[in-house]
Amino acid sequence: MSDFKRENRYIVIKRSDLEGAVSDLPIKYQKKVWDQLGQVVSMPNKHRQNTGKSPLECVIVEHDWPEYDYVWKAIKHRMETGECLFEQQQARIAKLEHKVEKYEATLFAAGAMGQSPCFKCGYNGPGYYQPGQHPCAAQHHAAIQLQEAE
């Protein structure tokens, strides 16, 4: 694939910024600005419709959001490899979660919840062995029952 380059492909105006800018104008000009803006904004929408394209829908991530750099990284990865970084990471997370579940089951079977605090959630309060009070207790009791049945 080609080298990825950021492009300035869209004109984006934040509504609150536009409303603030227009409200700074003398009242007699505000309606005219809104009318003209409505006409300008409708032009690309009509063009897309006339050329058989669906309405443009976008996600905007501002530079001061924590996701901003990650989104650029994901887009760059997609353009350079053709693969979706998010899907790759979700698959990796699912594999890791499965491994964690297996390790937890092994620890429950080994009786690791025998002493508080709970190795899984850190709970160390009243009703430690009561599933209604401590959700991990149900897994603990199930592991004990499974061992007794063997």
Image: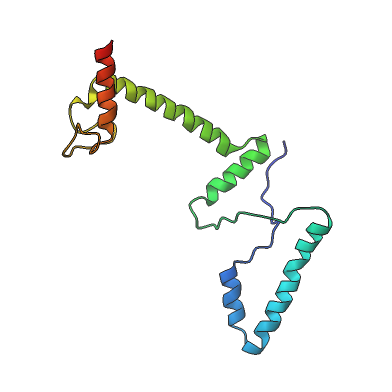
Q: Quadrant of residue 125?
A: top left
Q: Which residue is drawn at 47% across and 27% down?
A: 95
Q: Quadrant of residue 136?
A: top left
Q: Please determine whether, in this image, residue 92 is positioned above or below residue 144.
A: below
Where's residue 66, x and y in %?
48, 52
Q: Please determine whether, in this image, residue 99 is positioned above or below residue 42.
A: above
Comparing 137 with 85, the one in front is 137
Decide if residue 43 is on the left or right side of residue 118. right
Q: Please determine whether, in this image, residue 66 is positioned above or below residue 99.
A: below
Where the N terminus falls, by quadrant?
A: top right
Where's residue 94, x and y in %?
48, 30
Where's residue 76, x and y in %?
63, 42
Decide if residue 14 is on the left or right side of residue 108. right
**Number of dots carrying numbers:** 0
Q: In which quarter of the image is residue 77?
A: top right
Comparing 122 with 125, the one in front is 125
Q: Residue at x 41, y 24 (%)?
A: 99
Taking the view exactly as shown, the residue that stands out farthest to the left is 126
Q: Is residue 119 visible?
A: no
Q: Can residue 71 be seen in this view?
A: yes
Where's residue 20, x and y in %?
57, 76
Q: Which residue is drawn at 52% across and 35% down?
A: 90
